[in-house]
Amino acid sequence: MSVRAVVKMFPTSFDGMPPLLESGARLHGKWSGRTYSIVKQLGSGANGVVYAGRLGDQIQAIKLSCQAADIALEYKALSEWQKTGSATFAGPRVYELDDAVIHNTPCFFYAMEYVRGETMDRFVSRRGVKWVGPLILQLLTSLYAVHQTRHAFGDLKTENVLVQTRDAKVRLIDFGGMTPFGRGVRQFTKWYDRAWWGQGERKADPTYDLFALTQMICALCLPEFEKKWIDSNRPGPELWGEWVRVIERDERVRLWKPIVQSVWNGHIVNTLAMRDAVRRAVVKGIVDLPKVSATTGTGRKPHENKRLTSVQTNHKSKPDADWTTWFLVLSAAAACFAGTFVWHIWS
């Protein structure tokens, strides 16, 4: 069924979330006639719930909502980006748009690729902060493609970025916050929203996503702050001065401080400029890796802690980690170049 038809038939959004589906429930598409068997709930957002559903011998992800226009526009954005065949496409591939009636409630859904992976914060927690740079480089290539469509991703956060299990490729999920430039962002998360911090408007433009990206970098390197500060219920503007001082002083974000501050100060205003800055930081981080791995967040040096010195020595005897990081940097750089070339032709 076409996007235009859905919006025309159901111009008014329904209030509230769709009825919850249990494992084993059936979701029957009104127009396609296909029936999905619900496997489990994957997550929920401001405008819907995402399930894993089985269709034949395949597992697909299904976003279900009571808001026809939101679902239709998400599907349209993903399908149009997908049709370009661009190497920079990082969203899930979409398969069909349909509607259904669940417990007498009209609902709308689209089926898409089920991406197997883990969120970026979990991946970095398990594999180490040395992965932050290569992953951010990949993410910037995808954001560049999004911005070329004159949209901001909107609700950019670590939970909406998956790292594929098989190849560590970054994939964007949950396009519910994708917003045309110039319009107000409706779906956001406090920590990544510059307006909550009192640092700008909640309006879609490239810098809105770049601010969120700096908060992602900081959250990945300093994971103890986000939940503690959000749970404190203190307003963002009151916390901002403290946050600036943390970034200024904490050694764990030493490599990232110039980039973060340049975005905050308005010196970096697009994805290409930030990509170049991140690429330089990643290369510098690899060169400095032995020294960084031997220095803790408290500033202790190797000669002050024999255990740390031992850890550093063990690290040097295992070159695989450095080789992996170099491989990721080169792959990400190649992806950035290919993405830029493809999008210049397309635009």
Image (cartoon, rainbow, N blue to C red):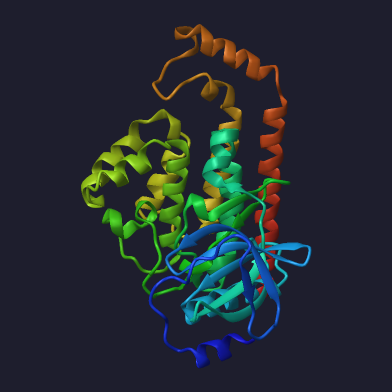
| Side (left or right) of 234 relative to 79 | left
Q: Could one spot residue 199 in this view of the protein?
A: no
Identify the residue at the far right of this view. 57
Say if 32 sits above or below 204 in the image: below
Q: Quadrant of residue 205?
A: bottom left
Q: Could one spot residue 272 in this view of the protein?
A: yes
The x and y percentages for residue 246 are: 32, 35
Quarter in which the N terminus is drawn: bottom right
Say if 322 sits above or below 160 in the image: above
Say if 236 sits above or below 221 in the image: below
| Side (left or right) of 7 relative to 57 | left
Residue at x-position 57% and y-position 75%:
109
The x and y percentages for residue 318 are: 70, 21
Q: Which residue is more in the foreground, 344 or 302?
A: 302
Q: Quadrant of residue 272?
A: bottom right
Quarter in which the C terminus is drawn: bottom right
Residue at x-position 52% and y-position 24%:
292
The x and y percentages for residue 48 are: 48, 68
Residue at x-position 61% and y-position 66%:
25
The x and y percentages for residue 161 are: 55, 53
Task: Give the tally of numbered discs.
Answer: 0
Q: Which residue is more in the foreground, 111 or 174?
A: 111
Q: Which residue is more in the foreground, 23 or 134?
A: 23
